[in-house]
Amino acid sequence: MNRNPINYFAEVEQSAFCPGNVVPGIAISPDKMLQARVLSYHDTHIHRLGPNYHLIPVNMPKNAPENNYQRDGLMRVDQNSGGGPDYWANSFGGPAPDPTYGEPPFEISGQAARAPYKFPDDDFVQPGNLYRDVMKEQDRAGLAGNIVDHLGKAQRRIQFRQTAIFYKADPDYGRRVAEGLRLDMKEVERSAKMSQEERAKTTAK
């Protein structure tokens, strides 16, 4: 605050203060009241001012513009990130999490800090069961055909990356899509054996 408001509605009634907005080096303490306010203030602002309340001039960060994947919604008054991707991870140069801005650890019994949750690589079990055991042949053919129609408009490297994921769910699933897209099946199988990080790296360009 370096001056008095010029317009009461624009600069007072539309202002949205939230204790969850902190600068690097300052963390949210385990205080229960503060934890509740970090959640409820943001939720209240969404109901009061809309999901893009952070774009209202009085609420916009002045020195560090936000880099996120929030799109659309009421009161979206900027370029809505143009034609950039609206998901992460991606290979189009979109913003990525920066661990240097994470909350500093604090003493409990040893050190505690935020870290990505790692889980066994079983993301493909349920999709594979759905494809093999639930769908009928007509369903499987229709699924593959729809995917080919839409994925056929994507870049070739993206086609290989995504088809390898279908192959990991079920080899027949990946084979049908690969044939529809006229992809090298050996290359799809090789990519399916890679980790997600390796597959993203080899299909980055």
Image (cartoon, grey):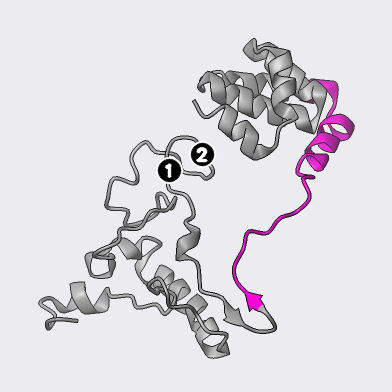
Q: Residues within 10 Å of mark 2 (few under 14, many from 20)?
A: few
Left or right: where 103 falls relative to 185: left
Q: Position of residue 95 (x, y in %)?
A: 43, 48
Segment colored magenta:
111-139
Q: Position of residue 31 (x, y in %)?
A: 55, 89
The dot on residue 94 is 1
What amino acid does circle 1 point to? Gly
Q: Position of residue 126 (x, y in %)?
A: 81, 42
**Does the rendering let one see residue 81?**
yes
**Does the rendering let one see residue 150?**
no
Determine the image quadrant of residue 139. top right
The residue indicated by pointer 2 is: 90
Residue for point 35% across, 44% down: 81
Question: Compared with residue 149, is residue 35 higher up or lower down, i.e. above or below?
Answer: below
Question: Compared with residue 94, is residue 185 higher up or lower down, i.e. above or below?
Answer: above
Residue for point 44% across, 39% down: 85
Pointers 1 and 2 in contact (C-beta within 8 Å): yes
Task: Please check the rendered image and state whether residue 120 is part of the magenta-colored stretch, yes or no.
Answer: yes
SS type, badge 1: loop
Question: Compared with residue 83, is residue 72 higher up or lower down, i.e. above or below?
Answer: below
